[in-house]
Amino acid sequence: MRSSYTTLMQSKYFSPAFNSAIFDGPVRIYFAQFHEALALKIYFMVQQQLVEETAKAKEAAKASGANILVMVYPTSDSFQFSFENAKSENPLEVEKWGEDVVIGLRGPLEDENLDLLIDTLRMTMNNWKPASLVRSGALQEL
């Protein structure tokens, strides 16, 4: 799915609390303003720790229009609303949404769970194959 903000706003993943975002290539971080420090921390960790993975994901996003959406939910309840089948102990969930991938964070993550997020992003970027790339054969070039 070539996600647009309007499409996202109408999806189960959107929370009215999301009033800020950081877009960097294929990675889009949505958050409430009061989680800005966490969102910036995530952004800089991605920039520092996922250099090769981000470059590969940028090419896939450019060719397909797909994105990786990181949603920092303000509360466990808002997270649970979007990820109905989530187990209560998981700090994050990953779901495909069309050609996009949504990574939902259960409220603000504690620092010990940031490594889990980075590992999840690494695996997502390494295994991300938007269907439009597979169909067109462009995946072979990446």
Image: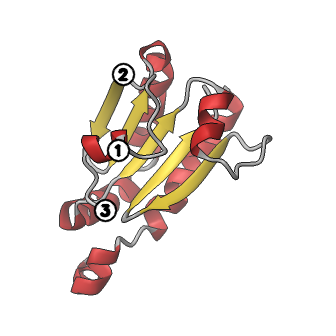
The residue at the point 22 percent across, 60 percent down is 65
The quarter of the picture where residue 139 lies is bottom left
Can residue 129 be spotted in the picture? yes
Q: Circle 2 sits in a helix, a strand or a loop, which is it?
A: loop
* Residue corresponding to mark 3: 1
Task: Report the residue marked by disc 1.
Answer: 8
Disc 2: which residue: 19
Quick check: 130 above or below 55? below
Question: Looking at the figure, which quarter contains the N terminus?
Answer: bottom left
| Cα separation between marks 2 and 3 | 22 Å
How far apart in space, not on screen, are marks 1 and 3 (Cα)?
10 Å
Mark 1 Cα within 10 Å, few/some/many (few <14, many 20+)? some
Q: CA distance from mark 2 to mark 1?
A: 13 Å
In this view, 140 is above or below 103: below
Q: Amino acid at mark 1?
A: Leu
State the image coordinates of residue 48 (x, y, percent, origin top left).
42, 40
- Report the amino acid beneath label 2: Asn
State which tag comes first along the sequence, 2 or 1: 1
Q: Secondary structure at mark 1?
A: helix
* 104 relative position to 92: left or right: left
